Image (cartoon, rainbow, N blue to C red):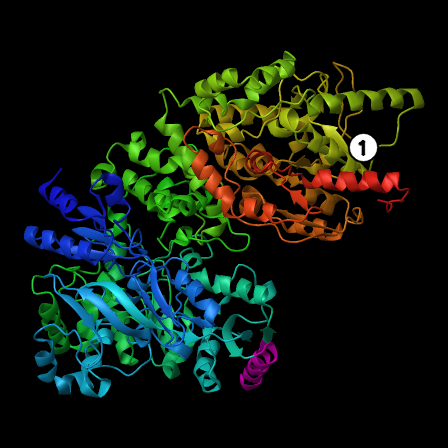
């Protein structure tokens, strides 16, 4: 332990972390920069803050305040001690509805303030797109704005008073009339009045530099306002009094379509006289699908408010009439508005990938010009991009003249970094030529501070340095930011990463096979750090359960970044053997929520499997990897030896079960699920034998026009065969024949070039010698060599159904003898595979082709995998399910949400009269995760977030839907509730119709 660390531990009551993990988590924010701190302190109160500053001052160690770490310009990183306010100093201290003010701590997430203010009809005006994770302290430090700034201004406009501790330990209460000003500040201003009155551009989004003009007498010498935007360089904020505004009772959203972004930009300023709440702009290349938007190549999102829905709509329609648009749409439905705003809010992440998949980066994220000059500026900006051979997609706050853009800088090579510098210098000159500010929202940080003389001139920048010296004479607070800045091309976070691809198991097709590029996907926007999930979202359940950065997707990505950096300057120097990375990944549920909910598609479940594969190579694994990771093997042996009754009996004896759980690495709190006395496969084979016997007696029957193979996943096969039986009942009612997958390889005739020209049987549907398997349990535990072997055997089994030309192989073979060879024929559709377990379907759709990226059969199998609802919708489009007219609760399976999509399921439920929305989040069991020793409390916390409350609050006639075996098990073990697969619910409805004499519609 260093002397600094020891003194800090003695001096503060909060948390002190000088370990590798704590430091690695704060090396980066959402910018291009990386600085490695000495340690991290999470203070509990202002006294702790003062104590940290005193200790660090005595050691000459810098201090960097940090909130949510979503800063774009690098100001939330540092080489000294980082103050993390999110852990303890994160409360709403008080809220006064009459005065419309709130007292908040710096680590408070904005959405939590909005939650506290909403019952009083109030809200905090500024709302950056990171509102679900950015903090009030960070917003004050950067003078953040957000989409509603045309109505409610910047954070500085909403600040009344600030409690600040200076670098030398002085406690100040900042306000108007020079309240709280440090000694020497007033004299400095009085001597520079002329410069301060003429040296700042007039525009709504001028964030760059220090707001010294707020100290002018005509601006009431507002020290608190002047402090806003100082980026942690003047003092450390410990508490703030902020102003709240009245929230409109109703809102409407006018979406205005234009030919291109230039036309949208030209129109934006003309809408301001109508007093909209927002005037946001974005172009088509940032929109995943324009289906929900009016015609156009770019759009303005113009929000209006009113005391009623009619008034809000009328104002929106007035704006549509006033705007010269190609097309327009007015949305008053709150859910529809949220869906559209989600597109805009995710742009900061989606913009980091160009349409062709190449990377794009911040650095010139938020320049601002006078709104009337925005169109001209964008045209010049586009020309400048083209002259440097760069690409970027502008979007942002068109009504305030503030543009966000991610640009495809090459920050990995010397030549690319040189071009980054040249472009930055020329763009700074362009912004100034248009009367703009280098920063219009996110601050200068390291990204732009070097260029401030181009905007303000040397004399004004020298004045900034003098102001900094008044507040912080020892240059202790966030040095290298704003004044005397580090070069804009120094400390780039990519400089320490390996230049050659790392040898890995997965293919990472979206990242060119490069694991480093996959890890670089995390740009730090921190959507994974949301403290409450809304709608169908899943990411990141482990962070919401623990509140710890290391258990967020971003935190894990940071540790992987440091691991890849290794000896080149990374904090993690033992590579794949790292215990820090292992421990951070341990609580990853592999829910894959980040794959869909992260704006840049970070897939931590895959990264975890990759890491575990390397970490345990040639080493003994945890017991759970053997007991649950190889579950298909154990259950297959139980089936072959007919041991299910014996296993169930032994598991019901508590002492024996306790021993088994301890040996298997299973949590003591868990009950071992009961095995089915008859597997689904045995039931289906018996059914097929009976069908064959009847067919031989009466002659060869006519086959159904459509046949599918029902995938024998381990959970349906051995643990819940009732789901498989129900699925067969429903599929056949819809006119879809069901086949079991073969249990033995087919004979395959090939040419010398390997082309398949014929296939034959060798009693493939007899007693199975092998089983098709998705490999899920092996992948989730990182046993990727075994997973590949299992998946290749699976491809061998189903190869006859995967011929490149679908017409060659169409269905059930005519020959059934052991040595007969024939071509397959009989049905019209190419063979498809219906998978009832969502996690298995997701593994076949994604893990299979990404793990066996060198086998073309993998992609063909993945393309033919259908969920139960997808199969009914695609193969029996005219079939109508039984009408049940019952409410439903439950949770959309996390893999269904992240990989498969649930649109078909929603339509099927609607057709069956099953009403209500399923919750988001994750059930918390997540396959092996919730069963593993040490995971029970986190698993339960995840279930308690949404799933269990929704079930407890349901009425008696409500159907509890849970398509995943894990979800059903979690419901049973934690709530005593039996969840059912949608197939079971529909099968019951069909049986009820049959008993009641109803005639179902003809398929």
Q: Nearer the viewer, residue 205 or 704?
A: 205
Q: Position of residue 456 (x, y in %)?
A: 19, 77
Q: Position of residue 367 (x, y in %)?
A: 32, 71
Q: Nearer the viewer, residue 817 or 60?
A: 60
Residue 556: say if magenta: no
**Range of the magenta residues?**
308-327
Q: What residue is at 48 percent from the left and 62 percent from the top?
A: 286
Residue 316: say if magenta: yes
Q: What residue is at 7 percent from the left and 75 percent from the top?
A: 184
Residue with the mark numbered 1: 826
Q: Is residue 632 above or below residue 404?
A: above
Dot 1, crowdedness within 10 Å: few (<14), some or many (≥20)?
some
Q: Is residue 365 above or below residue 650?
A: below
Q: Is residue 124 above or below residue 871?
A: below
Residue 265 appears in which quarter of the rendering? Answer: bottom left
Report how many numbered discs are placed on residues in the image.
1
Q: What residue is at 66 percent from the left and 54 percent from the top?
A: 916
In terms of secondary structure, what is the magenta stretch mainly? helix
- As drawn, which residue projects farthest toward the right? 698
Q: Position of residue 294 (x, y in %)?
A: 59, 71
In the image, taking residue 527 as reference, residue 944 lies left or right, namely right
């Amino acid at each position: 332990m260093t002397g600094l660390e020891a003194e800090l531990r003695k001096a503060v009551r909060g948390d002190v972390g000088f370990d590798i993990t704590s430091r690695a988590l704060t090396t980066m924010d959402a910018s291009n920069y990386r600085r490695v701190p000495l340690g991290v302190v999470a203070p509990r109160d202002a006294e702790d803050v003062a104590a940290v500053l005193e200790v660090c001052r005595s050691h000459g160690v810098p201090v960097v305040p940090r909130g949510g770490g979503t800063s774009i310009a690098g100001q939330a990183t540092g080489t000294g001690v980082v103050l993390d306010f999110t852990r303890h100093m994160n409360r709403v201290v008080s809220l006064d509805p009459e005065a419309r003010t709130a007292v908040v701590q710096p680590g408070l997430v904005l959405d939590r303030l909005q939650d506290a203010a909403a019952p009083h009809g109030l809200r905090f005006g500024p709302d950056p797109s990171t509102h679900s994770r950015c903090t009030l302290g960070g917003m004050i430090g950067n003078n953040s704005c957000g989409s509603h700034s045309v109505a409610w201004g910047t954070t500085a406009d909403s600040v009344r008073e600030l409690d600040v501790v200076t670098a030398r330990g002085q406690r100040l209460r900042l306000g108007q009339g020079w309240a709280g000003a440090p000694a020497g500040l007033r004299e400095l201003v009085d001597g520079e009045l002329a410069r301060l009155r003429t040296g700042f551009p007039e525009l709504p989004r001028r964030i760059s530099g220090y707001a010294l003009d707020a100290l002018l007498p005509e601006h009431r010498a507002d020290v608190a306002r002047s402090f806003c935007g100082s980026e942690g360089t003047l003092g450390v904020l410990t508490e703030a009094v902020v102003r709240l505004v009245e929230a409109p009772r109703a809102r409407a959203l006018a979406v205005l379509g234009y030919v291109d972004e230039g036309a949208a930009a030209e129109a934006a300023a003309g809408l301001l006289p109508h007093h909209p709440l927002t005037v946001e702009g974005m172009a088509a290349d940032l929109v995943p699908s324009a289906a929900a938007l009016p015609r156009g190549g770019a759009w303005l999102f113009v929000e209006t408010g009113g005391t009623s829905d009619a008034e809000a709509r009328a104002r929106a329609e007035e704006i549509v009439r006033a705007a010269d648009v190609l097309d327009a749409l007015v949305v008053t439905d709150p859910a529809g508005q949220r869906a559209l705003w989600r597109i805009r809010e995710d742009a900061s992440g989606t913009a980091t990938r160009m349409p062709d998949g190449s990377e794009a980066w911040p650095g010139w994220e938020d320049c601002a010009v006078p709104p009337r000059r925005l169109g001209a500026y964008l045209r010049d900006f586009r020309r400048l991009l083209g002259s440097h051979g760069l690409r970027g997609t502008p979007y942002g706050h068109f009504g305030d003249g503030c543009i966000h853009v991610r640009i495809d800088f090459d920050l990995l090579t010397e030549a690319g970094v040189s071009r980054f510098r040249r472009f930055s210098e020329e763009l700074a000159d362009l912004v100034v030529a248009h009367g703009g500010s280098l920063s219009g929202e996110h601050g200068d940080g390291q990204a732009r501070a070097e260029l401030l003389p181009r905007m303000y001139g040397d004399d004004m920048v020298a004045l900034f340095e003098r102001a900094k010296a008044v507040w912080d004479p020892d240059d202790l607070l966030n040095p290298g930011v704003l004044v005397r800045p580090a070069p804009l091309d120094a400390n780039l976070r990519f400089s320490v990463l390996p230049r050659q691809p790392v040898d890995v198991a997965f293919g990472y097709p979206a990242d060119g096979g490069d694991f480093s590029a996959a890890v670089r996907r995390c740009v730090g926007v921190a959507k994974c750090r949301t403290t409450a999930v809304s709608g169908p979202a899943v990411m990141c359940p482990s962070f919401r359960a623990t509140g710890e950065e290391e258990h967020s997707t971003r935190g894990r990505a940071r540790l992987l970044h440091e691991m890849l950096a290794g000896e080149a300057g990374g904090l993690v120097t033992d590579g794949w053997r790292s215990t820090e990375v292992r421990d951070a990944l341990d609580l990853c549920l592999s829910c894959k929520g980040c794959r869909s909910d992260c704006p840049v598609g970070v897939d931590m479940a895959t990264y975890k499997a990759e890491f575990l594969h390397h970490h345990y190579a040639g080493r003994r694994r945890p017991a759970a990897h053997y007991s649950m990771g190889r579950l298909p093997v154990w259950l297959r042996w139980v089936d072959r030896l007919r041991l299910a009754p014996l296993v169930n009996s032994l598991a019901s004896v508590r002492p024996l079960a306790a021993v088994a759980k301890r040996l298997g690495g299973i949590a003591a709190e868990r009950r071992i699920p009961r095995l089915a006395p008859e597997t689904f496969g045995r039931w289906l084979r018996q059914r097929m034998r009976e069908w064959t016997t009847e067919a031989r007696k009466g002659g060869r029957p006519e086959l159904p026009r459509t046949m599918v193979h029902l995938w024998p996943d381990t959970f349906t096969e051995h643990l819940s065969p009732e789901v498989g039986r129900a699925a067969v009942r429903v599929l056949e009612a819809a006119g879809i024949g069901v086949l079991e997958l073969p249990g033995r390889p087919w004979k395959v005739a090939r040419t010398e070039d390997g082309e398949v020209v014929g296939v034959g049987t060798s009693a493939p549907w007899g007693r199975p010698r092998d089983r098709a398997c998705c490999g899920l349990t092996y992948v989730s535990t990182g046993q990727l060599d075994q997973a590949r072997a299992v998946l290749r055997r699976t491809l061998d089994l189903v190869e006859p159904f995967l011929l490149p030309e679908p017409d060659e192989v169409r269905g059930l073979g005519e020959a059934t003898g052991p040595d007969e060879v024939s071509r397959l024929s009989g049905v019209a559709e190419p063979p498809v595979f219906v998978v009832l377990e969502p996690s298995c379907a997701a593994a076949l759709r994604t893990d299979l082709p990404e793990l066996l990226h060198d086998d073309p059969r993998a992609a063909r199998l993945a393309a033919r995998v259908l969920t139960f609802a997808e199969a009914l919708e695609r193969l029996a489009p005219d079939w109508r399910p039984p009408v049940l007219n019952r409410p439903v609760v439950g949770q959309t399976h996390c893999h269904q949400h992240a990989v498969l999509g649930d649109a078909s399921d929603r339509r099927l439920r609607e057709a069956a009269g099953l009403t209500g929305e399923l919750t988001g989040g994750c059930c918390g069991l997540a396959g092996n995760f919730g069963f593993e020793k040490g995971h029970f409390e986190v698993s339960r916390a995840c279930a308690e977030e949404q799933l269990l409350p929704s079930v407890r609050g349901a009425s008696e006639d409500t159907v509890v839907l849970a398509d995943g075996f894990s979800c059903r098990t979690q419901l049973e073990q934690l709530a005593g509730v039996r969840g059912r697969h949608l197939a079971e619910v529909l099968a019951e409805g069909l049986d009820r119709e049959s008993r009641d004499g109803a005639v179902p519609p003809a398929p």
